[in-house]
Image (cartoon, grey):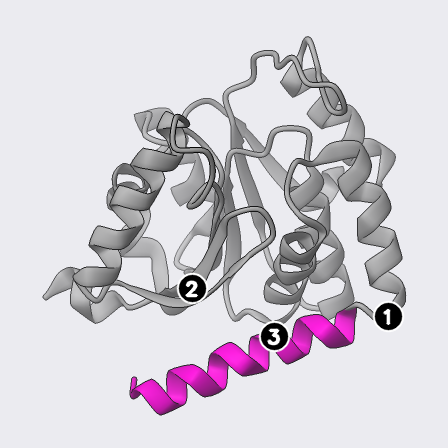
Amino acid sequence: MSNEARLHDCLDLMQTLMQYRQQPIHGQLNKIGNRYSMLHLDVLLLIYHFAKTCAGHILEIGAFLGGATIAAAIGVRDSEKQKAIMTIEPGGSLKHWRVGTKNILRDLGRNLAKKRVSEMVTLIKGRSFEPATISAVERTLGTAEIGLLVIDADGAVQRDINCYAERLADGCWLVIDDYAGPAENIKVTFTRRDVDALVAQGCFETLGFYGWGTWIGRWRQKSYFS
């Protein structure tokens, strides 16, 4: 893609986000984000947009309490098309002043049910790189491809790409959190290292940075497999 075409796509994405800020979905996702997510509202709006418009299914690695999952589910619902949403979450607990929880999987399930999207989501309990998890994703996908990949896990982006690259559609939307943040945050260090390497290889195409440090881009299949 030429630099001119990429600049056009970057500006188009910014304009799309600006338009969503004037629509009811902005207030809806603001409430969801405050209750269930540590992602910035702009990122939730983009996840909604990508889920609504992408050709292919949706894979999320690191659901936490389900804020991004719910945003994607609303996007799929508004698209009026059949798209699978697979979300991977190993569980655990987290101390946080706003969204702390003693049982992530329990609260994730409750939140999806409360927002009436449980039946739209395939919740895979485990780690992204475990054979059982990969097999569960494969069973859900069948012969279809992934059109949106959201990664908000432990910073090992390259590992997760290696696990699912063969199922990513060319041009698949990518949302990767923790690209930027405090220098002492080891997750940020790993995430930026892997994302920058994949951009340099031509596998990732950068379209912007949103919220509190989330990288947004697209997958370029040919560069990965060349």
What amino acid type should be assigned to the residue bearing mark 2? Gly
Query: Which dot marks residue 217?
Result: 2
Q: CA distance from mark 1 to mark 2?
A: 24 Å
Quarter of the rendering occupied by the N terminus: bottom left
Q: CA distance from mark 2 to mark 3?
A: 13 Å
What amino acid type should be assigned to the residue bearing mark 1? Gln
Q: Which residue appears at 67% of the width and 57% of the height? A: 42
130 to the left or right of 115: left
User: Where does residue 22 sit, x and y in percent of width and height?
Assistant: 85, 72
User: Where does residue 9 sit, x and y in percent of width and height?
Assistant: 48, 82
Residue 138 versus residue 65 in the image, above or below: below
The residue that mark 3 highlights is 14
96 to the left or right of 217: right
25 to the left or right of 15: right
Q: Which residue appears at 67% of the width and 53% of the height? A: 44
Secondary element under disc 2, as helix, strand or loop, is strand
User: Which residues, given as a range, are shown in magenta?
Assistant: 1-20
What amino acid type should be assigned to the residue bearing mark 3? Met
Secondary element under disc 3, as helix, strand or loop, is helix
